[in-house]
Amino acid sequence: MAREEDFDANLAGEEGQSEETKQSWFKRIKKGILTSTAEKKETPEGLWSKCPECNYICTVTELRENLFVCPKCNHHHRIGSSEYFEILFNNNEFEVLFEDIRSKDFLNFTDLKSYKKRLEETWAKTDITDSIRIARGLLHEHDLVVGCMDFEFIGGSLGSVMGERICRAIDLCLQERLALLIICKSGGARMMESAFSLMQLAKVSG
Ligand SMILES: [Zn+2]
């Protein structure tokens, strides 16, 4: 029963767990498919996805083969960094960089819950460590660094970690003369880091 509810909630793009998550101030847009990150890699047969635009129902495998574009109406489903990396890099082979940089609760910020708790819950829920992942791999013959934001991680919000990872990616690309691609899908600055978020613009520009 709980599984069925979660399935419905997934189709609607909600977490489908506690009331608290449903009412969080960062309301998730009721669009797109959301399978948990662990399930994305090897999609079990028979998992279905419904297009939020035209209600066309197909298997997630079929959707994946069509690069997450609805086969019927061409609607582009929301995807995360894993899917982008899979689409871009040869044979889905890439190295994820700067994963050890993690957010801290500098300001002891609390909204509905403390920022520290929010971070810990998000880390437990997903296998991504912040709202951007940097990966290096080959796209055809080109050595490429890709920074891809994940909306799933606190709305893809820009905090100190995202700023630092982008800067390190730029430095690496300058040093080794690599191409850099940044896929932006952010919900804005992360208010829990306040001025630290705002400083990232100056840092990245520098
Ligand atoms: Zn559609």
Image (tube, rainbow, N blue to C red):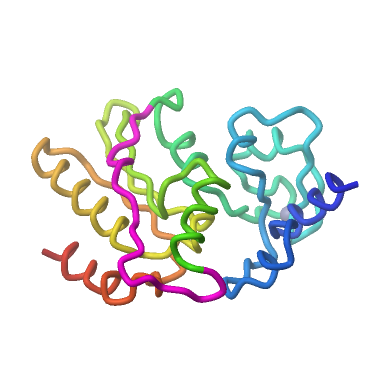
92 versus 22 height, above or below: above
- Specify whether 133 is left or right of 119: left
Residue 193 against residue 8 in the figure, above or below: below
In percent of width and height, residue 163 lies at: 26, 59
Q: Is residue 173 left or right of residue 108?
A: left
Q: Residue 124 versus residue 158: which sits nearer the camera?
A: 124
> In terms of image quadrants, where is residue 60?
top right
Of residue 7 and residue 50, the one placed in the foreground of this image is 7
**Going by the picture, which residue comes out furthest to the right?**
1
Q: Position of residue 71 (x, y in %)?
A: 71, 45
Q: Is residue 101 magenta?
A: yes
User: How many numbered discs, if any?
Assistant: 0
- Residue at coordinates 19% horizontally, 48% vertically from top-left? 168
| Magenta-highlighted residues | 94-113
Name the residue: 58% across, 41% down. 37
**Which percent across, then down, holds residue 98?**
28, 41
x 28%, y 26%: residue: 141
Q: Quadrant of the C terminus?
A: bottom left
**Above or below, 132 relative to 173:** below
Residue 85 screen position, x and y as percent: 44, 38
Mainly helix, strand or loop, the magenta region?
loop
Q: For this view, does 96 lie left or right of residue 15?
A: left
In the rendered image, residue 177 lying in the magenta stretch gets the answer no
Above or below, 193 relative to 136: below
Between 86 and 192, the residue placed more toward the observer is 192
> Which quarter of the rendered image does ligand 1 occupy?
bottom right
Q: Can you tell which quarter of the image residue 31 is in?
A: bottom right
Q: Viewer-proximal residue, 179 or 133?
A: 133
Image quarter for residue 135? top left
